[in-house]
Amino acid sequence: MDFTSKAFRAVASSWLVMAFIGQMIFAFYILMFYGGTTASGKLEQWNHSGQEFYLKGDLMGNIIFALHVLMAFIVTIFGPFQLISGIRKLLPKWHRWSGRIYILSAFLISVDGLYLSWVRGSAGGLQGSVLISFNAIIILVCAYFALTTALKGEFQKHKKWVLHLYAGMSGVWFFRVFLMAWLGFWRAPVGFDPETFTGPFLIFLSLMVYVFPQLVVWCYFFAKESGSKVMKLGFTGFLSMILLIMIFGTFSATFGLWLPRLM
């Protein structure tokens, strides 16, 4: 294997490791914050994250939000494991069952996410609801093809759609990480209003974390299968920049957002 191929694989693996670490931290936050407040019966503390997730008297809405959080925890935990080839080979049964749970959770989290966005409302009002709906639609499409290709035995296509699904399912995590990277860099809410949570930067960021990752996944497979050293080298450099921003954003989100809320 030449240097270009080694660098390509090393950066792709490093990106996955960083995503795994960051999403495990996010899963821990979900478990401790939402799980802890739910177990103690202090559901009104759901609103400490900045939105009114708990509404007194809205039993259906509160149940749907609790289901949404549960699904978020499941997909955050199971997501990275779907991409590890060693697990697929050593534990094929576990891979199949965890994959079914992952895809089912993808459908559920998208549907109840649409309900919460359009019935309960989103941060940023109509703008937020429209943008989060893009993510839900992407997840539903990717989950459908990940499921159908597996059922047809088209496993090479299945692997690609699972990575597309993982990128879509990571949208909410990407949003927090890159938002905190932006705030950490500028030390101020540049390009948006923190009170209304609207502004051009948030539109740009939403499209970047919901739509752009699908293009990145496509470019990854194109570079991998092309055999072109130029393509691999270009993608390696591009993914390296994204990786550096992810590291900074994960650090900023952990110590500037998630841990302070737990404390």
Image (cartoon, rainbow, N blue to C red):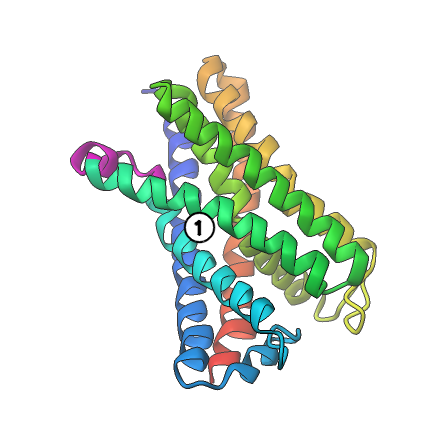
Which image quadrant for residue 137?
top right
Q: Position of residue 126 (x, y in %)?
A: 80, 57
Q: Position of residue 97 (x, y in %)?
A: 27, 41
Residue 100 is at least partly visible in this image: yes
The residue that label 1 is drawn on is 19
Q: What segment is highlighted magenta in the picture?
A: 82-92
Please determine whether, in this image, residue 178 is positioned above or below residue 189: above
Determine whether, in the image, residue 181 is placed left or right of residue 250: right
10 Å neighbourhood of mark 1: few (<14), some, or many (≥20)? many
Please determine whether, in this image, residue 106 is positioned above or below residue 115: above
Which image quadrant for residue 224?
top left
- Image quadrant containing the N terminus: top left
Our reading of the magenta stretch's main secondary structure is helix
Determine whether, in the image, residue 93 is placed left or right of residue 163: left
Q: Nearer the viewer, residue 250 or 128?
A: 128
Q: Which residue is drawn at 44% across and 70% down?
A: 29
Q: Nearer the viewer, residue 107 or 74?
A: 107
Please determine whether, in this image, residue 255 is positioned above or below residue 154: below
